[in-house]
Amino acid sequence: MHYIRSLYIFFSILALIIFFFSTKEVEAKSFEINNIEISIPFENDFDKNNVIDSGFKKAFFELIYTLTKSSDHKKIKSIQLNEIKSMIETFSIQEEKFIDQIYYVKLGVSFNKKKIFNYLEKKNIFPSQIIREKFLFIPIIIDENINDLIIFSKNPIYNKWNEDKSRFALINYLLPTEDLEDLNLIKKNLDNIENYNFNEITKKYSLDNYIISLIFKSKNEIRVLSKIFNKKNEIIKNDTFKNIDLSKQKDLSIFINDLKNSFEDNWKKLNEINTSIKLPIVIKFKNNDVRKTIQFEAVLNDIELVNDFFIKRFDKEFVFYEILFNGSVQNFINIMQNKDYNLNTQKKVWTME
């Protein structure tokens, strides 16, 4: 009897350790935005608090532009500073200095993930998972006036595409190397270019993701046919641009920016989080190893589709977690399998194996 009582006390204390120490990390679910740079002249009315407030705004919009499609940005332009501050958990001054009467500061800002998602849900905005991927990008200009194509270094889009990189972009672009064999191959298929699959070129780069953009240039407009491929999807996208002259730097910059936004929006749509769906999932996890339990919570913490999770109860053998998931049951199972967690889903309460 004494042995059973001691054993019960041991497991109770162990479970409490898990609860008090690991849930500190649960409450710290956040979006981290670092290296936010602000500079302002050091004058008589200088106020450091105003500078930091500017940093809060800059960090917030960087996060929101990373999470949302460009069509949603206008919905949040009028947000007040006090609303932004209410979603901040912590901030840090990572660097500050004075040079030639200019004050420079670099901030790190941590936003509460749940509060950000709640704010976006109230605005009827579905955020995206922050999944950064590399895409091979092959832009080909087809000049319909002379029935010829422009590719590689003769193509202004190819030359300027990676010149300006946005901090909140999720797609990182790899441009193909200039290859005479590839050029001849594309020219050979010019008359059937819209149906050509480009496999002989794309396979050289060992990437699952790639975009082929056929840019048809006529006198009055530019039509862009983009074939977007990733591991699970193949998407055909059409865009039309009027009054754009690619020989003018301003027009070229506008064209590239608009096309990048189109690709980003498409990628975010594929990885959208429906925050209105909160599927409850109960999993029991053996409590004989605190490190494994904390590691499990860290994994849940990193999954964007996990809206929230908490310890529902515990006994001498198991900790029971309730997880609120913004997606389907199969989606959750697939994500956990990719993270090397196998679930036994035969009963109402799942078991981690």
Image (cartoon, rainbow, N blue to C red):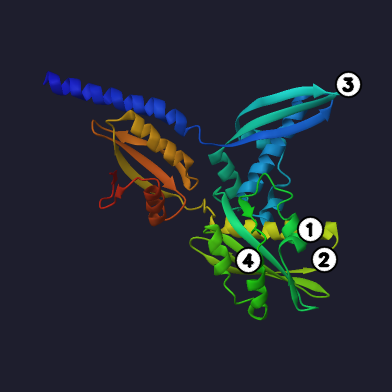
- Give the residue at x 64% y 43%: 63
The percent position of residue 126, horizontal first and vertical second, equals 57, 53
Label 1 vs label 3: CA separation? 39 Å
**Disc 1 target residue:** 254
Quadrant the N terminus occupies: top left
Q: Amino acid at mark 2?
A: Ile
Asked if marks 2 and 3 touch (Cβ < 8 Å), the reply is no
Q: Within 10 angstroms of label 3, few (less than 14), some, or many (20 or more) residues?
A: few
Q: Is residue 304 positioned above or below 23 on the image? A: below
- Which mark is first along the chain, 1 or 2? 2
- Which mark is first along the chain, 3 or 2? 3
**Disc 3 target residue:** 44
**Disc 2 target residue:** 244
- Give the residue at x 46% y 31%: 25
Q: Is residue 293 positioned above or below 98 on the image? A: below
Label 1 vs label 4: CA separation? 19 Å
Q: Amino acid at mark 1?
A: Ile
As helix, strand or loop, the secondary structure at mark 1 comes to helix
Visible residue check, residue 260: yes
Which is more toward the observer, 220 or 11?
220
Of all residues shown, which one is farthest toward the bottom? 191
